[in-house]
Amino acid sequence: MSPAGEALNTDPIGPLDQEAMEAAQRRWDGLIKPSRGLGSLESFVVHLAGITSQEVPCLNRRRVLIMVAEHGVAEEGVSAYPEGMTRSIVEAFLHGQSGTSVLGRETATEVYLIDVGLKENCHRDCHAAGTTVPGYQLGKAAAQWISLKIAAGTKNFLKGRAMKREEVLLALQTGANLVRQAAEEGVQALALGEIGIGNTTSCSAITAALLQLPPEEVVGHGSGVSDNAMERKRRVVAQALCRHDPPTGDAVEVLSMVGGLEIAALTGAILEAARLRLPAILDGFVTCTAALCAFFLDPGIRDYLLLSHWSKERGQQKIVDFLQLKPLLAFDLQYGEGVGAVLALHQAYLATCVLRDMGKWPKKRNNDPSPRIL
């Protein structure tokens, strides 16, 4: 699939299917368990019913899309890891040695790694067709590698624009095309993730610009930087916003000024998933930032946003409050790479199995107190 592919879908996002949600809730209420016994899992699946228009959502085929790109602002020392670490993380993925690779294997979730902005190409031997790792399912690759490079990373947005507006639009379209392709191949639910050293700095700048917040309210420790490095990160974001003076509410322009290629691609993926009524679960700060961009492009996206977990990132908390999202998990994750989204998607899948297969309370009969499983 080429990066350009088909034109970006601009159809309006329709409302959730209320009838399907009501049917799913009635089904939950009729199962042999205490009312609301599965807690947030029940409401999460009811939400899925509204997205998919299915009383019992089918999540048998699941895929995680992990967008990969590098950030020029990383040269400012805003991350706990050096600039070249993005490529090392990718190689660990493709050898089946990352957390998401392991989770993908054990939860039967297809792992797709998409290069939209690496500075260099990954080693050929890391993504040879049919690559297998000892202990992995026979004939299953550790991850599927797709190269749809839009540019060799972004520019340092402290010195100029992160990328051209045309590159933002192409990244949006690339993300949408990947979701469309997944739907055409029979994928029934997505998890979203990313890899990109320096991307929480970009996300902090985007969040501050779109929500009109001061940098100190959105800049966090990211991948684990020290307090001194976090203060440097805050200064970088403040200086970049002062330099660019992003326009209020223009997500494409903000992405062009201080964004990342993977963030833009995730934004396009989130929008297209909603239009196709394909559930797509958000991971942490970066995917939530993409969801924020998607909201400013089409506010109808709000009802389709599914959050896997909270993180300790200040910026993500601001976004979650603004979009009124409720996380499924409370694992205190500080990771990224789609780990939280894959975990949440698997929990959702298990819950749909319960909704599908669990026994129902019997209809009451006069003078018959004994329950029966129907």
Image (spheres, rainbow, N blue to C red):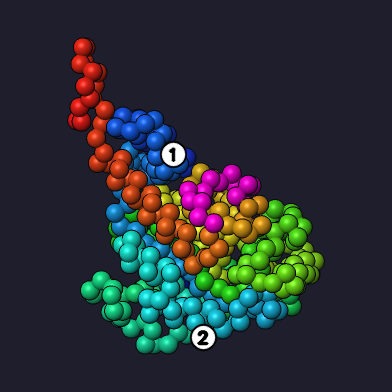
Q: Earlier in the sequence, mark 1 or mark 2?
A: 1
Above or below — where is 271 with respect to 32? Answer: below
Q: Quadrant of residue 82?
A: bottom right
Instruction: Give the structural element (helix, strand or loop) at label 2.
Output: loop
Q: Position of residue 291 (x, y in %)?
A: 56, 55
Any part of residue 139 in sight: yes
Q: Is residue 325 magenta?
A: yes
Which residue occupies the foreground of this view, 287 or 270?
287
Residue lying farthest top? 367
Q: Quadrant of residue 198?
A: bottom right
Q: Position of residue 60 (x, y in %)?
A: 29, 54
Which residue is disc 2 drawn over? 120
The quarter of the rendered structure image containing the N terminus is: bottom left
Any part of residue 270 in sight: no
Residue at x 69%, y 72% (from the top left corner): 226
Q: Of the residues shown, which amino acid type is indicated by label 1?
A: Gly
Crowd class of label 2 (few under 14; some 14 to 19; many from 20; radius 10 Å): few
Query: Residue 175's mark?
Result: none
Separation of residues labelled 1 and 2 (CA atoms): 46 Å
Of the two numbered discs 1 and 2 in the rendering, the one whose residue sits closer to the viewer: 1
Q: Of the residues shown, which amino acid type is indicated by label 2?
A: Glu
Q: Quadrant of residue 141?
A: bottom left
Range covered by the magenta-colored residues: 319-332
Q: Position of residue 132 (x, y in %)?
A: 29, 79
Residue at x 37%, y 69% (from the top left corner): 102
Which residue is disc 1 drawn over? 39
Q: Position of residue 374 (x, y in %)?
A: 19, 30
